[in-house]
Amino acid sequence: MIVIDLSVGEDPTQLIQLVNAAIVEREGEQRQEEGCLSVPGFGGSPTRPLRVTVRGLDPHGNERIYAATDLLARAFCHEIDHTDGLVFVDRLSPLKRDLMKRKLRKQVREGWEE
């Protein structure tokens, strides 16, 4: 299940909850800074589609289809990646991913030394 709320709780009508969400169409390309609670304190700019069409079931079992662009398209891709066992770091170039891993390891070492 994915949950997306671009209004951050300000507008209940923007809450999207989908079970078995899948991207059925993608178009274009965008790169914007992303972060994730799975990797706190780190960000990156993975390549994402500019537009996506997503299909899934709402909490009542009704099929829902969303056509999304820009931030909402990125949010769908980001959350669907989680259901596939991926985080945004997995979408970065190998060099950027390696640099981030090194920084994470250093933080863990420094945290354990204190």
Image (tube, rainbow, N blue to C red):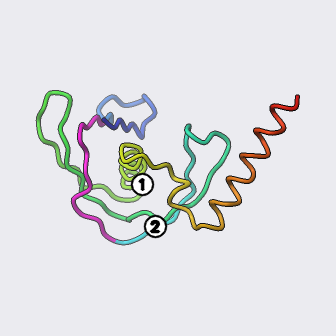
Q: Would residue 15 be found to the left or right of residue 6 on screen?
A: left
Of callouts 2 and 1, the N-terminal one:
2
Label at residue 30: 2
Q: Nearer the viewer, residue 51 or 25?
A: 25
Total number of numbered discs in the rendering: 2
Q: What is the residue that sits farthest to the right in this orientation?
A: 114
Asked if the magenta segment contains residue 22, the reply would be yes
Tell me which residue sits at (56%, 61%) in the image.
45
Report x, y in % for residue 38.
55, 39
Q: What residue is at 75 percent from the left and 50 percent from the top?
A: 103
Q: Is residue 62 left or right of residue 37?
A: left
Local SS, label 1: helix
At 37% from the left edge and 38% from the top edge, which residue is drawn? 4
Which residue type does callout 2 highlight? Gln
Assess whether residue 80 is covered by the magenta stretch. no
Q: Nearer the viewer, residue 83 or 43?
A: 83
**Tag 1 residue:** 74
Q: Main secondary structure of the magenta part?
A: strand
Residue 49 percent location from the top left of the image: 38, 65
**Three-letter amino acid code of the residue under disc 1:** Arg
Foreground pick, 81 / 62: 81
Left or right side of 66 for 111: right
Position of the C terminus, as image quadrant, is top right
Q: Is residue 63 above or below residue 29?
A: above
Give me the disc on residue 107: none
Image quadrant holding the N terminus, namely: top left
Q: Is residue 38 above or below residue 98?
A: above
Disc 2 on helix, strand or loop? strand
**Contact? badges 2 and 1 (CB < 8 Å):** yes
- Over which residues does the magenta segment extend? 16-27
Circle 2 packing at 10 Å, graded few (<14), some (14-19), many (20+), is: some
Task: From this view, report whether residue 10 is shown above or below residue 67.
Answer: above
